[in-house]
Image: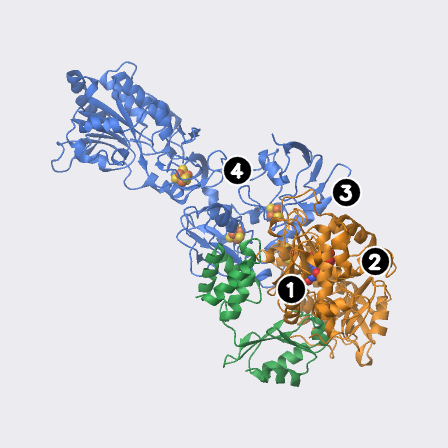
Chain colours: A orange, B blue, C green
Amino acid sequence: MQKVPFTTGYLTAHCGDDAYGTLDGYKAEGGYETARRVLKKGTPEDLIETLKASGLQGRGGASFIAGQKWSFMPGAEDDTGPRYLVCNADESEPGSFKDRLLLERAPHLLLEGILLAAFAIRAEKTFLYVRGEYGEAIRVLTRAIEEARAGKVLGPRALGSRFAHDVVLVRGAGAYICGEETGLLESLEGKKGQPRKKPPYPAENGVFGRPTTVNNVETLCHVPHIVEKGADWFRGIGTAESPGNTLFGVSGHVVRPGLYELPLGTPLDEIVFEHAGGVAGGRKLKAVIPGGLSMAVLPAGQVDVPMANEFLRERQTALGTGGIIVMDDTTCMVRVACIITHFFREESCGQCTQCREGTGWMNRIVSRIERGEGRFEDLALLKDVCAKMEGKTICAFADAAAWPVQGLLRHFPQDFQSHVTHGQCPYPGSFVLA
Amino acid sequence: MTERVRIRVDDVEYEVDAGRTVLQALDDCGALFPERDGKRPEQTDALIPHYCWHPKLSIDGSCRLCQVEVRAGADAPPKLAIACNTPVSEGLVVDTKSETVAAARQGVMELLLINHPLDCPICDQAGECKLQDYAYTHGVDHARTREPRRKAKKRVDLGPTIVFDQERCILCRRCVRFCREVTGTGELGVFDRGDRSVLETFPDEPLDNAYSMNVADICPVGALTTKDFRFKMRVWFLEDVDGICTGCSRGCNVHIGVAKNAVQRYLPRRNDAVNGTWMCDDGRLSYHEIAREDRLTTCLVREQAIGEDSPQLRPASLDEAVAAVAARLRPLLDAKGPGVIAGIASAHASNEDLRAFKTFLDVLDVDTIGLAVARGDSDDLLVEAEKGANGAGARAVGFGALAPVADRIRGGGIEALIVLGHDLFADGSLDARALAGLDTVVAFDTHRSPVERVAHVVFPVRHAAEKDASYTNSAGIVQPVQRAVVPGPEVRDEGDFLQRIGAALGLAGFETETETEAESKAGDGAE
Amino acid sequence: MIGETLRARIDAEIARFPVKRGGLLGALHIVQEGQGCVSLAASKELAAIFDVFPVEVIELVRFYNFFHESPRGRHQVYVCTNLPCALRGANVLLKGLEQHLGVGVGETTADGRVHLGREECLGACANAPMIRVGGVYHEDLDLAGACAVLDALE
Ligand SMILES: Cc1cc2nc3c(=O)[nH]c(=O)nc-3n(C[C@H](O)[C@H](O)[C@H](O)COP(=O)(O)O)c2cc1C
Ligand code: SF4
Ligand code: SF4
Ligand code: SF4
Ligand code: FES
């Protein structure tokens, strides 16, 4: 079981409570009442309107408005066959571990969110794709789904309504790219998780050729709360553009790494210094990656930024998955670049030219600089490779591989230059590479 | 009727079917280089370079070379998108020349080249390599990386026909899709991820199917090459002549690659009504028969009677051979009339020669005529059961089934047979024994064959690659061919021989010295 | 050979999807777990069961980290070495484990007991460093703790 320390809000209020993971325990907290009411008396249209009004943004990294995404699905008039909901529980973005908490500790909250979303888009089935490494989550969810079937929460008359629904749990098999929604659909179909070119979009032709919506675990966990308490309540939390709480995962050189459920727009420095207790070992802050490894780093001087896209954008970075990675002043940014580029090189699915070749090239260049064999032109070369990758590929993976490198070069060129000049790492106390 | 929409690509407007993508629509209009099978781009071609897209395969969208800027209308903001997968829509504006587009293409090219081996000088694809071509036209230096290039397998024997160079592969997956979508054999796959991705077969299993060599054609680089043509010669020494394959009644269109007055290879030539962009391996390799040792190069005349010891047939001059035929047929005609003569046509003969043959027989008043054609395997893709390019042409001229002719021969009603080709034994209704008793057998053929055992006079005729003629395929499409190579001086068209024989027999309308003069004036200059 | 028990599980897996091939990833898990690897022979059998080309099964085996063409030791131990863990000493831990086991990354101990590998982020960033042993996470480790976990494996 995950031992991660967390602070609570509406999402995670009961995550410390073992009983909450059981059907009875969840019901004892009023669980499934919202879905029961909606499935029996509500309409998909109203549900979508509520979601749209709430302004909930997807929490899988792209921050797309959830209600809008649901409205792309064909309406009731389309009766050509089944449509599906896919819950993206492939959480693999380095620095992100929020979905894991929800999966392990709030499985029924997720199932209730799934039921509501499925009702909204008229899906007969949900494929819940969990990353294969999450063994505990898979065990918990398997049990929860069985309980839910036995308790008639799922089934031909879900929660006693006329709405039929079932959830199929699918285990990933170790490939980061399966978190990208169309890579995930391919994987569900028993194929290599190579993202699909668009068009067609999943809402027209998703998994098994049917209209499909893909939502992140956390996104779906917000839904029961929004439906229960109303769009206005949700709008009252966070910022005007980015409403609601989210789970910020804080890791790296902090006193209290953990998950912090806080409103979007909470300043990054507040999260790092207050909630996470500041930099460990009394050291000074050097840099923070605000949203998982795919997002551009911020130097210590720029962490006074509210954690919401409308503010982060101005600093050329983004919220991503809210995975905050904190680095102290011993940290060598070239080594950070080595890890980042190694990761993207390892995980590129390999189909697009620029991504397949660019990720490898960047990693070779960065490793060479780290070994002390760099040249000054390498900095410009790296920027150029990033430009060749960004915005030109099938999926956003290549962008995600370029952005963090661009960020490091933007804010810490001196670390790279120093390696080139001195042929060695200027940070004797830095973390080490493999 | 499909809805039509108008799109604009740079300065040219096209009206195209809705529901197509930009590359498909341009290809439909015949405006996409090089898919319209052009050797050189023309003014009217849309120049959108592409690697993974192929008109006869599913859209892959992975090479990213075909990026263009598209606007939903003249005033909409431009968006970089791949032309192979962008649907056309009314008023769509496509810009293939903007700086953004150039930069995007240049980026793809450079990234492809960083791991590409620097072995163009020894690469068999040089001259037909799309990587080389585009690198040149898009101004990319062969990579400014000092990083060591990726090492991979060289000279992998993929099967009976193909050799693979893993280092040169740019992973466009055309070959993979070909084997899955076209042949349904699925031998190839891409293993692993990222820059470790490699094209492979199932361990220790070959790439082996009836169309396997097409993968070498569609491979944009020199990663897949045919064993047949590998290192034979540099492609820029080849002259390219339009021809057809004569292996079966499909009549697949081919580029005949010629050098030193010899056919060096066949490559499929695109014809969507006939073969699309493919051809079968047997047909592709059939060019070898043109210069095979058993080609007939002179007329042959029989000295002794059938059944006596060899030498039965000896080389003879044209005049001797023509005279020999006349000497045999004239008395027979005078004594017994045309009723004892039979004519068998071949599906290997051209329309022109078949018409000449029919005219000859008509003038003689021979009415025991038929068509001999060999049959073999067929498949759902291209290969037809009828092994000869012109069965349909022969039937159109008036040559029907072989059975009535065979019956009359076996029944003893025939004394002389004039036969084109050597397929008369193919269906088993006739054999050498059945012909052994004939007074006269005159054969016209390209190669030595069992017909020789019973023939009294044999004329050496031209292969389709050696003549200007036409053939009618199984769908009734008449396909012209041009002379690609010049055969030996004694090898002529059936029609030419028949003309002379007719003249020697004194038939009305037949004269000597026909095409020969014109031909020698034109010069035997295909080399 | 995919025996009857595994075959029954594969059939049950297939039944969960509207299209047969949907069960292929699950089937690969079943074979990998049941036989310790997905051998070439098993790949061919799976290809026949799922009506796909054998090479497509190998494509999957080589695409997904979970599947291997040959067995890798009784226990597969992976150290997360992505940034959050690396910042907290994951690579020091990894080197310690290499010494402790006497094998390098990607290798299996001579007795076939433990395969040691490194992995990308496993979603345990706040409890770094950590190791994954099969489907079980061991978090907030120091070298002594990690060695103890490995020593307890059969
Ligand atoms: C390379 C890449 C990896 C991704 N990984 C994940 C992931 O692990 N989990 C996730 O929920 N979304 C991931 N996403 C985002 C998904 O593509 C998709 O936007 C998301 O699942 C949609 O759900 P949401 O709208 O509820 O956020 C990833 C995207 C990319 C480009
Ligand atoms: S951008 Fe990278 S990960 Fe995404 S589809 Fe292309 S190659 Fe695969
Ligand atoms: S071998 Fe040729 S056709 Fe096949 S993927 Fe490689 S480059 Fe493309
Ligand atoms: S299908 Fe027939 S015509 Fe076409 S290449 Fe094969 S043998 Fe020749
Ligand atoms: S031709 Fe369009 S992406 Fe390759």
Q: Badge 2 local density, few (<14 within 10 Å), some, or many (20+)?
A: many
**Is disc 2 in contact with disc 3, using a CB cutoff of under 8 Å?**
no
Counting from the top left corner in percent of width and height, residue C81 is at 66, 73
The quadrant of the rendering that contains the C terminus of chain B is top left
The Cα atoms of the two marked residues, 2 and 3, are separated by 27 Å
Q: Chain of mark 2?
A: A
For disc 4, the chain is B
Mark 3 Cβ inside 8 Å of ligand 5: no
Q: Secondary structure at mark 3?
A: loop
Q: Can marks 1 and 2 be said to lie on one chain?
A: yes
State the residue position of label 1.
A150
- What's under tag 3, amino acid-wise? Pro
List x then y, in percent, for residue B443: 24, 30
Give the residue at mark 2.
A242
Q: Which residue is mark 3?
A: B77
> Quick one: quadrant of the N terminus of chain B?
top right
Q: Amino acid at mark 4?
A: Asp
Which one is nearer the viewer's eye here, A192 or B29?
A192
Residue C103, x across and y down, in percent: 55, 80
